[in-house]
Amino acid sequence: MQVTPVVGREWATETGMHELERQMASDPQNFLRDPEHNIQIGCWYLEKIHEQFQICQTPSPAWLLVTTLAERAVEWNRVGENAKALSGAEFVNRIDITSTRAYVLSIMERYRQLKNAKGQMVPSSNP
């Protein structure tokens, strides 16, 4: 998973795992390479982001998927007060990390392929 040291430290602090918090502080890269820790932190983070966006008005399940997958979704999703919510394509256009944008687009393409295979049309979010 694409877990950063910042997210790892946040996880350790919020879950109250003090020994793991110390490990994250001393050697975050090594700690995050451990598959068990990486998956645990990644799942925690996805759930946290998922909960944030379930509170918001989400136009579609595809939009929720895109926002959940993107590490900096909160930042990229910001609009002015009383502004209209972003479309999926507008959100993807705001992703300023090339590798993350490519990752989100590839996941959305796989999501569309799976839904289309089941006979459910999914709108494209390609910019």
Image (cartoon, helix red, strand yellow):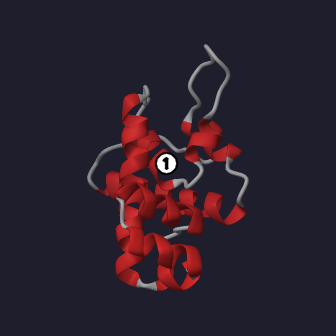
Residue 26 at x, y = what percent?
57, 80
Tell me the residue at 56%/73% (across/down). Answer: 25
Q: Residues within 10 Å of mark 1 (few under 14, many from 20)?
A: some
Residue 53 against residue 3 in the figure, above or below: above
Residue 96 at x, y = what percent?
73, 53
Nearer to me, 6 or 77 = 6
Can residue 122 be seen from the camera position used here? no
Can residue 24 be seen from the camera position used here? yes
Residue 16 occupies quadrant? bottom left
Tell me the residue at 71%/59% (across/down). Answer: 97
Q: Quadrant of the C terminus?
A: top right
Nearer to me, 78 or 127 = 78
Residue 73 at x, y = what percent?
56, 46
Total numbered labels placed on residues in the image:
1
**70 left or right of 15 in image:** right
Residue 14 occupies quadrant? bottom left
Tell me the residue at 55%/39% (across/down). Answer: 88
Dot 1 corresponds to which residue? 66
Tell me the residue at 34%/80% (across/down). Answer: 36
Residue 70 against residue 83 in the figure, above or below: below
SS at mark 1 in the image: helix
Residue 8 against residue 53 in the figure, above or below: below
Residue 125 against residue 58 in the figure, above or below: below
Residue 17 occupies quadrant? bottom left
Q: Residue furthest left?
A: 118
Residue 44 at x, y = what percent?
37, 59
Q: Disc 1 residue type?
A: Val
**53 left or right of 27 in image:** left
